[in-house]
Amino acid sequence: MNHYAYFYIMKTSLELIKEILQWLEEFTRENTEDELSLDSFVLWLNSKLFSESHGTESVANPEALDMELSFLLVMQSRFYKTYVKKVLGQSELSSPEGFSFLYHLSLVNSYRKMELIKMHHLEPPSGIEVLKRLISKGLIEEYDDPDDKRAKRIRLTEKGRNELRSIMPKMSEVFRLMTAEMSLNEKLHVLAFLKQMNDFHGKKIVSN
């Protein structure tokens, strides 16, 4: 490498670092209340760059766009339930919510009942029914909360852990199908947008 080529590469690298630092500064200004991490910065930057590259595209009918987007999001939920139904038909579980309850309980020692139900944005009666089915099948167990005698905590049983372990390979295939063979970059874009939508609706529901 000759002298001029070296300095050209150094200059280009420094300009790139400067641009990244400018993006990082904007990221920290926009996320003052959230925990900052490299993962969240990468997702934010992907979303930002994608928005800028598509920001000049005009939309003739914004209402129709909103309707189509909402419809497609609902369809993804239906596709997911269709895939999951085939997997759960060969297991002790009977609903996607039941699987999700087991999965989240596998990540912690226990949850209060209402904690788990609210996490899934279910109506309390519907969430209680899911828990009752899991308890009746011996997949989870409930016990008194030592910090609040009025509350009940739930945890995964050994049977529940084994059941989850047996269906996870097939559920992993469902998750792969749901991403529709997207590239890593496409997944990052979609994830950033969906996290933004999820945060918005989560805060809106809590405030109401």
Image (cartoon, grey):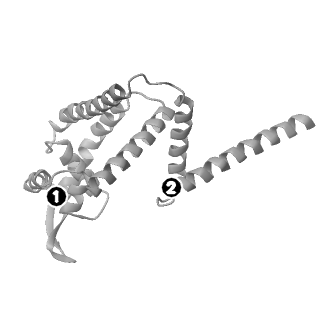
**How many residues crowd mark 2 within 10 Å: few (<14), some (14–19), many (20+)?**
few
Q: Name the residue under label 2.
A: 31
Viewer-side residue, 188 vs 143: 188
Q: Position of residue 83 (x, y in %)?
A: 24, 32
Q: Position of residue 29 (x, y in %)?
A: 56, 55
Residue found at x 36% / y 33% = 176
State which quadrant residue 117 falls in. bottom left
The quarter in which the C terminus is drawn is: bottom left
Say left or right for 67 vs 160: right
The quarter in which the N terminus is drawn is: top right
Task: Name the kind of residue labelled 1 in the image.
Answer: Ile
State which quadrant residue 196 falls in. top left
Position above or below: 59 against 123: above
| Residue 2 visible, this angle | no
If you read the primary sequence from the N terminus, does the residue marked by circle 1 or circle 2 appear first?
2
Q: How far apart are marks 1 and 2 (CA)?
A: 38 Å
Determine whether label 1 and label 2 are within 8 Å by CB.
Answer: no
Q: Mark number for residue 140?
A: 1
Position above or below: 35 against 9: below
Please state which of the two labelled residues, at mark 1 or mark 2, is closer to the viewer. 2
